[in-house]
Image: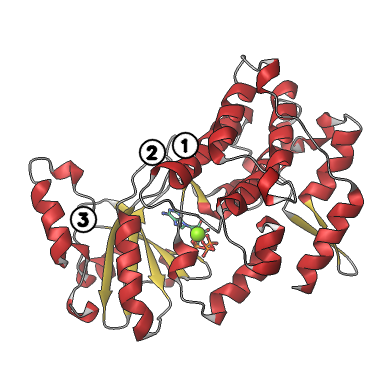
Amino acid sequence: MNLKQYCCFLKDEGLNKIQVSNKKNSRDYPWEMYTLKELLRATNNFHQDNKIGEGGFGSVYFGRTSKSVQIAVKRLKTMTAKAEMEFAVEVEVLGRVRHQNLLGLRGFYAGGDERLIVYDYMPNHSLLTHLHGPLAKECQLDWPRRMSIAIGAAEGLAYLHHESTPHIIHRDIKASNVLLDPEFQAKVADFGFAKLVPDGVTHLTTKVKGTLGYLAPEYAMWGKVSESCDVYSFGILLLEIISAKKPIEKFPGGVKRDIVQWVTPYVNKGLFNNIADPKLKGKFDLEQLKNVTTIALRCTDSSADKRPSMKEVVDWLKNGVGSTWGEENIPTLSIKNGDEGNDKDDKLKNN
Ligand SMILES: Nc1ncnc2c1ncn2[C@@H]1O[C@H](COP(=O)(O)OP(=O)(O)OP(=O)(O)O)[C@@H](O)[C@H]1O
Ligand SMILES: [Mg+2]
């Protein structure tokens, strides 16, 4: 089948079979049908005012369907013809992944030059918006919300690594890819996406620049991808959630400091209070903060094989944030010294 001949998932033969087998319960359908006309209408012809933001793969637009459902439409940059079929197959796989902490695909459109991916619109935006963006001042993320977002995002990621078929490595865990639903529950977005895009220069370059602070050293230096790269990025995200510090801070004169380098002296001196986001105004649970910091530092171990699995991280977080943090559940902490951190940063910069 020529990709250009179909306009959305459900026209694919294999997927029609899924649709038939699910016919008894329309809620089980993995995707909804969209026509280009409907998506153009929903987004006011991809009007600038509807644009939510722009990432490495394209732009995201807010839309409202004729049934008044709010959607987000990702309009992908065009790609080579060779990559298209592979892309469709991969998107089809990702479209089947369903978990309460993952932002599932609602549908897909491919026709002419357009590649559109449709998601549920997340009205509470992303962690990035709340931690560093326009909503940071309002401080809607109190401590319990932050903890539940951390656990939710960990569960979504653990599902991708351990339960989904095939297992999926996210590769781009960061604050803008953790969206928040109306109840402020975490929905991890763009899973498996990095893999979809052919080794086209554009995104790779942007990504390495844009999200350097989240990249595991072995990924940044040698492009070595594994589940533990996601664990590293998740550790960075955890530190970001509790401190609202950016993964990398830039100082005048081009000096950079990553969040692990920033947090380590506080941990060494036991000054955990200094780690919490000042916007919380002291309203946080110190024990939980210690536990989450400890877990984050285990996740960001510079050796990939010493990092925990996401399953362990979920268990630790649940124990560390609940009241039942027993001795046996406390991960041991090997704190990196400052030199090691500097070393790593240099290598990243040389990459
Ligand atoms: N379903 C959605 N609901 C609300 N906002 C969304 C949705 N999907 C994406 N966004 C927001 O739109 C913006 C652009 O998203 P996009 O995924 O294109 O870029 P990104 O997350 O910054 O980077 P990357 O391309 O690496 O994922 C981000 O701020 C993102 O949080
Ligand atoms: Mg994204």
- Which residue bears the numbered disc 1? 185
Q: Is residue 31 visible?
A: yes
Q: Residue at 55%, 58% (x, y): give it.
A: 172
Q: Nearer the viewer, mark 1 or mark 2?
A: 2
Q: For the residues marked 1 and 3, what is the alpha-carbon distance in whole angstroms?
A: 23 Å
Relative to 312, does residue 213 appear above or below in the rendering?
below
Q: Position of residue 227 (x, y in %)?
A: 55, 51
Relative to 253, does residue 248 appear above or below in the rendering?
above
Which sits earlier in the primary sequence, circle 1 or circle 3? 3
Q: Position of residue 346 (x, y in %)?
A: 84, 66
Q: Is residue 71 visible?
A: no
Image quarter for residue 187?
top left
Q: Secondary structure at mark 3?
A: loop
- Which residue bears the numbered disc 2? 100
- Tell me the kind of residue under disc 1: Gln
Residue toward you, 197 or 227: 227
Q: Which mark is residue 32?
A: 3
* Horizontal relation, residue 93 to residue 179: left or right: left
Q: Residue at 67%, 50% (x, y): give it.
A: 304
- Tell me the kind of residue under disc 2: Gln
Q: Position of residue 46 (x, y in %)?
A: 36, 71
- The reply to whether the C-beta atoms of the residues labelled 1 and 2 are less than 8 Å apart is yes
Which sits earlier in the primary sequence, circle 1 or circle 2? 2
